[in-house]
Image (spheres, grey):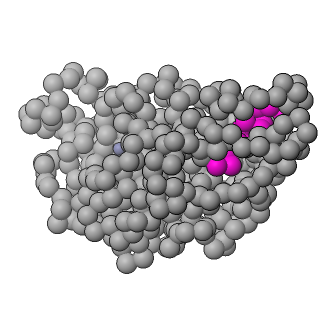
Amino acid sequence: MKKILVAALAASIMVNAGQAAAGCFNINAEAATIIQPGVITGFNSNNTGFNSTSPDAADYRATGGTAQGSMSISTFIPAGCVDSMAVSSTGSIVEVKDKYGYEDMKADLAELKAEYPTYFNYSSLGVTADGRNIYEAVIGNKNAGTHVLITASIHAREYITTMLVMEQMEYILQSADKGAFDGRSLKSWLNDVCIHFVPMVNPDGVAISQSGIDAIRSEKLKDKIREAYDNDLEAKRTELPFEEYLKYWKANANGVNLNDNFNALTSKIKIKTDKPSSEAYYGTPGSEAETKALSALADRTHFKAAVNYHSTGSVLYWNFTDNKLVEHSRDLANNIKVLSGYTMIDNGEEGGSFKTYLGTRRQPVTNVTVEVGKGKAPVDFSEFEAIWDQNRHVPFYVMKWAKEKGK
Ligand SMILES: [Zn+2]
């Protein structure tokens, strides 16, 4: 893919023409965005460090600094460009394209493993009703003391989040050998931290939203999807023609909204229908293969932080009923806010959601729901460049947060 540079920050950091001429300019600009939100660290012609304030700084201060989650990063990246978070401009595997789908992801996971065998591995957590794998990809040391989780596309029409996290994976992997973050080599970080990605929780649903009913192989499931349409028409949840309706599909192929299907805070679930639906049917708690797969992963791994990607709205949900780690969630959300510019929202859907499953369990997991994009889901492909800029560094900060503050 074409790697997108951070244009706004680059403009702020271009204080010395010599630096640009030396070919370090873009790399330093990249590094600067990683060092500390709100402060750009750069280098003058003598390679002496300087700090300059970015457009985000006021926002950063306004959020309360330390009280609400500053990272207190005091790193100085050496002048040698390769020591900073250099990103190679060649060798890109994950292609940025409209409707990046299950087959794209599957092929890219295999390629990433072939290219980066030292740092990367993946496996299937389970198989969906229509026979697709629910993949988990892992970057870093599986025996590390700190594990973090990043999920995407639990809601079918929010599939742009899969491409985002696949890009995040490749970005980390490209930087793994020569990159540094917060004053340490990325290699050393990845020895201490293990980042788990579930890039497409709901592959059947994504297939429906991207390609319609013909993407589903099972005749039984096709019938269920038609039944969901009739149910949603009857309940006036849609007025769209069938083909159009499927583009906004949110559930899995059984017509169950997976993010309401977890066995958590079930007393708060307000039943809307007992039949398949594009989004209104919650199923029986824990009934779906996708829900089982994520629940089992959370049960056997002690995650110290989790980010669940959704779209849309450019907001961060960090609180919910019975969240056992409210201040931790607020703090993590604040860091993501500084990176992304998204608005923090102090509530969200509760009963049966994955965030509730994580946040209310006996060993609770600090987690934030990140809603990317602005337009109606499925978010238009043209938004991806902005989404990438806002989220490319999120895994690095989640990793750091989890290591320093995660429970
Ligand atoms: Zn969603």
Residue at the location (88% across, 42% down)? 47
Task: Check the picture and name the quadrant holding the N terminus.
Answer: top right
Displayed quadrant of residue 45: top right
Query: Against 76, is 92 above or below?
Result: above
Residue 312 lies in magenta, yes or no? Answer: no
The answer to whether residue 237 is left or right of residue 321 is left
Read off the magenta span. Answer: 24-36
**Residue 144, percent across and down?**
66, 71
- Which sits in the foreground, 185 or 102? 185
Residue at the location (25% across, 39% down)? 278
Residue at the location (52% across, 60% down)? 66
The image quadrant where one finds ligand 1 is top left
The answer to whether residue 401 is left or right of residue 128 is right
- Which sits in the foreground, 1 or 366? 366
Q: Is residue 108 visible?
A: no
Query: Against 179, is 53 above or below?
Result: above
The answer to whether residue 132 is left or right of residue 256 is right
